[in-house]
Amino acid sequence: MKTELEVTDIQAIAAAVAEFMKPQFANLKTGEADDRIMGVPELSEYLGMSDKWVYDQTAQNRIPFFKLGSITKFRKSEIDKWMRKFDTPAVGNPSALKKLVGR
């Protein structure tokens, strides 16, 4: 079965989809803002960790960074990507988990 739509119908659908998606994209930052450069104090605050912790992580190459001369800098986009490696997915169905652990 083949259905043909009028151009005005297609435009109305596109407008409705665009309107529906506006809230989804309203809080997204531009790539420019996401790729800002941070120093150790800014990164420490962003991560909620101490400056010492940040320096320790860079000394052991555990966190993405780059050097400008002797100054350690971080790209927010790379830090966000690095942090996603530590995400733990939520358990969708608690009763399924109970079956797995035998309770």
Image: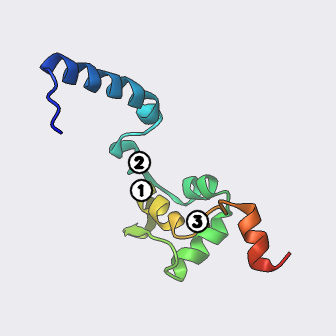
**Amino acid type for the residue under numbered disc 1:** Ser
Q: Residue at x 52, y 78 (%)?
A: 62
Q: Label 3's element? A: loop
Q: Residue at x 59, y 68 (%)?
A: 54
Q: Quadrant of the N terminus?
A: top left
Toward the viewer: 74 or 69? Answer: 74
Q: Label 2's element? A: helix
At which x and y percent is residue 98? 79, 71
Q: Tell me the tag on residue 77.
A: 1
- Residue that badge 2 annotates: 34
Spatial CA span between label 3 and label 1? 16 Å
Whichever of labels 3 and 1 marks the residue nearer the N terminus, that label is: 1
Mark 2 in CB contact with mark 1 (< 8 angstroms): yes
- Residue that badge 3 annotates: 87
Toward the viewer: 101 or 18? Answer: 101
Q: Is residue 27 above or below residue 60?
A: above
Check disc 2: other Cα within 10 Å, few if <14, some if 14-19, many if 20+: some
Q: Is residue 27 above or below residue 11?
A: below
Residue extending furthest front? Answer: 1
